[in-house]
Image (spheres, rainbow, N blue to C red):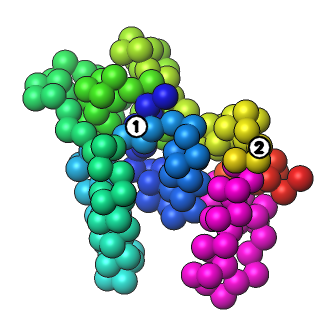
Amino acid sequence: MRLVLDTCVIFPTVMREMLLGAAEAGFYTPIWSDRILEEWRRAAQRLGPVQAAVAEGEIALLRAHWTASLIAPAPGLEARLWLPDAADIHVLAVAVARSADGIVTMNAKDFPRHLLAEEGLSRSDPDALLHGFWQARPEAMQAVGQTVLDRANAAGEGGWEIRPLLKKARLPRLAKALSM
């Protein structure tokens, strides 16, 4: 399964780490474009120079580790596509160009299911997607969650537990599943 990750699911650290951990566990192949990564960089830049530098480093690591995930839409493809927010058409174009199965986004209103279906695509929110992966292979997602939790505790003052960490990351169903 090939899924395009929208900027809004790549930018938050814990959400990105859970999604990429699931990809590393073999659940799907992630896809993005230079423009999606640039949107992440600009969003981080608005938070200040430290966050911008961190994002630059994370983007460089992402590019190095996931070399096959970066794709550019075919020239002229965006011109034939339509979405309610024209600024999101590039995400749809990447999905169409790569023959993706779907788009992972928190932005449901700008990616209507009927418009995506016309291109043979689905839309998933990250919590439902990751919860579905947990239902299929709970031990694999438990391992991903533990890795993300360990990173969060190592990066901060520690003391995080999986449920509050994932709830804060807007992954409440997954949080409940992994804390059982």
Residue 47 or 55: which is nearer the viewer?
A: 55
* Residue 178 falls inside the magenta stretch: no
What is the three-letter code of the residue carrying label 2?
A: Pro
**Magenta part of the chain:** 141-170
Residue at the disc numbered 2 = 138
Where residue 73 sits in the image (x, y, percent)? 20, 33
Residue located farthest toward the left when viewing the structure as drawn: 75
Q: Residue 77, relative to residue 157: is it above or below?
A: above
- SS class of the residue under badge 1? strand
How far, Cα to Cα, is label 1 from label 2? 23 Å
Q: Earlier in the sequence, mark 1 or mark 2?
A: 1
**Image point (23%, 50%), residue name:** 34
> Which image quadrant is residue 138 in?
top right
**Image point (52%, 49%), residue name:** 24
Where residue 64 sits in the image (x, y, percent)? 30, 60
Residue located farthest toward the right when viewing the structure as drawn: 180
Residue at the disc numbered 1 = 4
Q: Nearer the viewer, mark 1 or mark 2?
A: 2
**Image point (42%, 41%), residue name:** 30
**Image point (10%, 29%), residue name:** 75
Residue 125 or 56: which is nearer the viewer?
A: 56
* Residue 160 falls inside the magenta stretch: yes
